[in-house]
Structure formats: structure tokens, C-alpha cells
Amino acid sequence: MMAALALCGLIAVSLAGYGLFGERRRLRVVRHTIRSRRVPPGFDGITIVQFSDVHLGPYYSLRQLDELVNAINSLRPDLVAFTGDLHDARRKDNIAKYDPSPVLSRIQARLGKFAVYGNHDFGYERKLRSSGAFLSRGGFTVLINDARRVTLPGGEFMTIAGLDDCMLGKPNPSKAASKLHPDRFNVLLVHEPDVADRLARYPIDLQLSGHSHGGQVVLPLVGALVRTSLGRKYVGGLYRIGSRFRDKRPYVLHVNRGVGTTRIPVRIRCVPELTVITLRCEEQSRD
């Protein structure tokens, strides 16, 4: 009996050590291809690199962010999307101690860098917006219920929209959607993934979200252990959402598992993630 208890204790300590010092320091590049007839021919093959949930603080340093930026640049993205939670708001001094702007400014993306607020981007007291200035100084366009066209020299365009944080902000999907062209490819950035079920009536082709951290600790038969409000249903990876008002086809939701941690600084069977999404014009991609 004592031997069995000792073995269980050793396994628990080993898992905790791996989760604290091993897996959460790794980085996995996950690749997906999104095909749509609304992708303009000039955008066929462009890449969007998504990262999310950095949670700068004692458990994710500026040095780690610098290494992440090197990894992003090595992928040579056309567009970069950050889907919220720059600092970890659980500690009052994190925002004052960690200025990521110089590091973020090194990210290179020829067609632009876009970001939205997450719930941790409202600071320690969850009242004042804290991350927008850092992101703007880092060269990101911060979208709050707004949208921007990404236009090629020949005039072809797609649209990137962004919602305010759905927990602490004032999201207005109708306002953001008013700038979406119904016959063009539209990407929506929103931190919390579970709001996707409310958005199927808008002309969205691809929603990029974070927030869930993939559950951080994912156990066989049990699944994701760390779940949070508006990140319980869609935890990580690709999903097909509802039906489109345009052609009754579902749109695609991608939930990035994030690079940082929250609540507990541990990841087990949930490696930090960079996502590379390649867009393909459906008519051109058929062989």
C-alpha cells in the first residue's frame, strides 16, 4: 500500500514538474487551410498567423515573447492576428513592469497586424483598458467593434473585423458587421469563442478566437480541466458554426490554444500554439 501511494505521489510530482517546466515552454506551429469561393484570386495562398493569450507576467517573460516574435517572423506571415490577453491581470504590477511594445514592433507582416481586446486587457481592477496603447505602439491596429479592408494594389480586398471583449467590454457585432461586404471574404477577431453561436447571422467566413487556453491541462477520458466563461464549448481547434445567411454554409471558427497560462502556470497535453492559416480561393484550388 505504501509503495503504491509513493508511486502515485512520484507520478503526480513528475506530471506537475513537466507541466510547469516542460510543456508550457514548448511551442507548436499548427497549420490549417481555409477554402472559400469568396477568397479573391489575389489572396489565394496568403497566410494569417494567429497568436493569443500571452499573459505577460512572472510566468511569461519578455524574453519568451521575444522568442515568440522570432518564431512568428520565421513563418513570414502576410497578416498577423492577436486575439487578446496581452498581460496577466491577476497581478497588479504586471502592466507597469512589462512593456512589450518594442518586441511587438518587430513582428513583420506585409498586409498588416490586427488585434482585439481580451478580458485580461482591462487591467487588475478590470475597469480601465490597459493593453491597447502597448499594441498600438507595437504596430497593431486594435479593432473595437470596427473593421478594416486589406486591399491589394490591384484593388482586390478582404475585410478584418474585431469585436470588443465580450466579458468586460461592450461588443457590438452589428456595428462591426456593417462594414463587412457580403460578397467578399470576411474575418472576425473576437477573444471569447463561445459567442460564435450568436454570430451566424452575420457575413463571417472565418472567426479567430482564443481565451480557452485549450484547457491547459487535458487528461484522457476527462478532457480539458481549466475552463472559463465563454470558453467552455469551443476549447481548441477548428469548428463549423451554424448556417450562413448568404448561402446556408457554415462558417469556420478557429480557437487558438494560446501561448501563456492563467490560474495555474501549468500545461499538460496542451502545448502552446502558433496558428498558420492559409487562405485558398476555392475555384483555383481544385486539382
Image (cartoon, grey):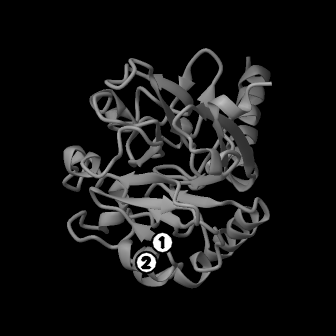
Looking at numbered disc 2 in the image, what kind of residue is underneath it? Ser
Q: Which residue is mark 1?
A: 140
Instruction: Say which quarter of the image contains residue 35.
Output: top right
Q: Is 241 in front, or is 124?
A: 241
Instruction: Please tell me which residue is depicted at 57% across the width and 56% down the height of the picture.
Output: 260
Horizontal and vertical percent position of residue 255: 52, 38
In the rendered image of this protein, does residue 42 appear above or below residue 101?
above
Instruction: Please tell me which residue is depicted at 73% across the width and 54% down the height of the picture.
Output: 21
Labels in figure, total: 2
| Residue 50 placement, left or right of 45 | left
Looking at numbered disc 1 in the image, what kind of residue is underneath it? Phe
Horizontal and vertical percent position of residue 129: 28, 70
Q: Which residue is mark 2?
A: 136
Q: Is 52 in front, or is 155?
A: 155
Instruction: Please tell me which residue is depicted at 57% across the width and 43% down the height of the picture.
Output: 257
In the rendered image of this protein, does residue 96 appear above or below residue 186?
below
User: Which residue is outermost to the front?
Assistant: 154
Horizontal and vertical percent position of residue 48: 62, 52
Instruction: Please tell me which residue is depicted at 63% across the width and 30% down the height of the picture.
Output: 282
- Determine crowd level at label 1: few under 14, some 14-19, many 20+ residues with C-alpha closer than 10 A: many
Query: Which quadrant does the C terminus fall into?
Result: top right
Instruction: Say which quarter of the image contains residue 124.
Output: bottom left
- Residue 210 numbered mark, or none: none
Distance between the alpha carbons at the discs numbered 2 and 1: 5 Å
Horizontal and vertical percent position of residue 159: 43, 52
Q: Are marks 2 and 1 in contact (CB under 8 Å)?
A: yes
Q: Is 241 in front, or is 99?
A: 241
SS category of the residue bearing label 2 = helix
